[in-house]
Image (tube, rainbow, N blue to C red):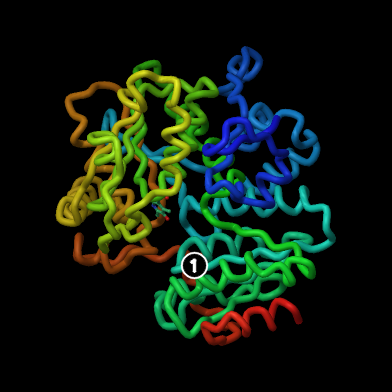
Amino acid sequence: MRFYSTQDHGLRVTLEQAVLQSLPADGGLYLPERIPRLGEAFWSSFHHQSFSELGFHVARSLLGDAVSPQVLETVVNGSLDFDAPLVQLTENEFILELFHGPTLAFKDFGARFMARLMSHLRTDSEVTVLVATSGDTGAAVAAGYHRVQGMTVYILYPSGRVSPLQEKQLTTWGDNVIALEVDGTFDDCQSLVKAAFLDVDLQKKRTLTSANSINLARLIPQSFYYFRAIQQLRSDDPTTIVVPSGNLGNVTAGLLAHRMGLPVSHFVAAQNQNDSLVQYLRTGHVPDRTAVRTHSNAMDVAQPSNLARVVDLFRDEKDGPEPLLTADSVDDEDTLDAMRRVYERHRVFLDPHTAVGWVAAERLNPVGGPKVVLATAHPAKFPEAVRIATGRTPPMPERLAAFQRRTKKARPMSAEYAELRAILSG
Ligand SMILES: *Cc1c(COP(=O)(O)O)cnc(C)c1O
């Protein structure tokens, strides 16, 4: 299996290149040259497979001979050491809990798989990963790469601009994960990372790679839990999956699963007021705006990078993504209202991202069949919003509380590139 760029359908690169380079030089995004449908053997044992077995077969089919079965099994088993339980709230409404990983959000799936795959694909003795973060992605990456062999990770975050709990999740790992506390903004952190990637002399000394959200290796494991959802659902009725969406990576993984033969009849990308896909499907382009702040802040994205992949996956369909994929936009008021209602009716706390999905699912009524909303984060990660909506504080899981007791270790630095360069050259 090889990989092409959404900007250049003639390009073919190996899995090593796609994963270690992250982005093609032409500014596109990588996708597999073929998306094979899973065969009879897979489906006949579908209901008896563990999560790791499902993951292995899906990844094996998608990656083909690009990686050996032994390596793939190690990577998948190392990534999927927590499950994605399906929880039923009403006769036809379910949530798929994707927040049982180390940082309690679905990004743990992508980060863990990507770290282990990179570690196996590297040819140099040591690979240096650079990430600029405004919070949650960096936490998942730090957790995902911690103690993974041959990988050194530098996390750049803006000093004083992440929440105290997020900061603990970024700065308390040690070993091969180094937190750099930048005296600047998130944009400064991104500029520093960009400058390092353009620094030819530095590249001679270190193999640099990025762990950003558009790496193909992050998408692949996200398709696994769509299979897990359908397996647990055990329904023959047409099923809708609602995906709280920002950069559209998660929904792209769902579309890949569908291409591989997963029986889903409809995907809804649920967005907050940053409704880029709603606009795109209506008008054919994304308005030139900047993101507005909402309670579902991990979805405050105005120009979603994975739109290029979504568009490319439908390039042979005369009507484009619809009707398989539709989009909806939910404002903060409706989001908080859903969090309150679901708590009052079911005694279940939803985080604001999941609540956006919940509202989008409700608006589908009276469409029949099961609706599965992906629960992308644990409510305890967003105690403020939960308090505003329900008047209560969600219980904090021990895994999250444990971070608060750990000691911060970060190296302060200015936003000058010379300083980052000195650190990376040392
Ligand atoms: C990143 C994130 C999203 C958005 O996912 P995309 O793949 O960017 O569309 C939704 N919810 C939470 C909690 C997230 O962290």
The quadrant of the image that shows the N terminus is top right
Tally the marks. 1
- Disc 1 is placed on an element classified as loop
Give the left or right position of residue 34, taking residue 226 as reference. Answer: right
Look at 70% across and 76% down and name the residue there.
Answer: 424
**Residue at numbered disc 1:** 133
Q: Quarter-wise, where is residue 170 in the image? A: bottom right
Considering only vertical position in the picture, is 263 above or below 303? above
Q: Rate crowding at label 1 as few (under 14), some (14 to 19) or many (20 or more) other CA atoms within 10 Å.
A: many
Question: Is the residue indicated by label 1 positioned so its CB lies within 8 Å of ligand 1?
Answer: no
Q: Mark 1 belongs to which amino acid?
A: Thr
Q: Quarter-wise, where is residue 421 in the image? A: bottom right
Considering only vertical position in the picture, is 49 above or below 97? above
Give the left or right position of residue 312, taking residue 155 as reference. Answer: left
**What residue occupies the far top of the structure in this picture?**
40
Look at 26% across and 48% down and name the residue there.
Answer: 287
The quadrant of the image that shows the C terminus is bottom right
Of residue 84 and residue 129, the one placed in the foreground of this image is: 129
Give the left or right position of residue 331, taking residue 18 as reference. Answer: left
Look at 41% across and 41% down and name the residue there.
Answer: 307
Q: Looking at the image, can residue 423 be seen?
A: yes
Of residue 205 and residue 333, the one placed in the foreground of this image is: 205
Q: Looking at the image, can residue 402 be seen?
A: no
Considering only vertical position in the picture, is 363 above or below 109? above
Q: Position of residue 221 (x, y in %)?
A: 58, 41
Q: Position of residue 69 (x, y in %)?
A: 78, 33
Q: Position of residue 189 (x, y in %)?
A: 50, 73
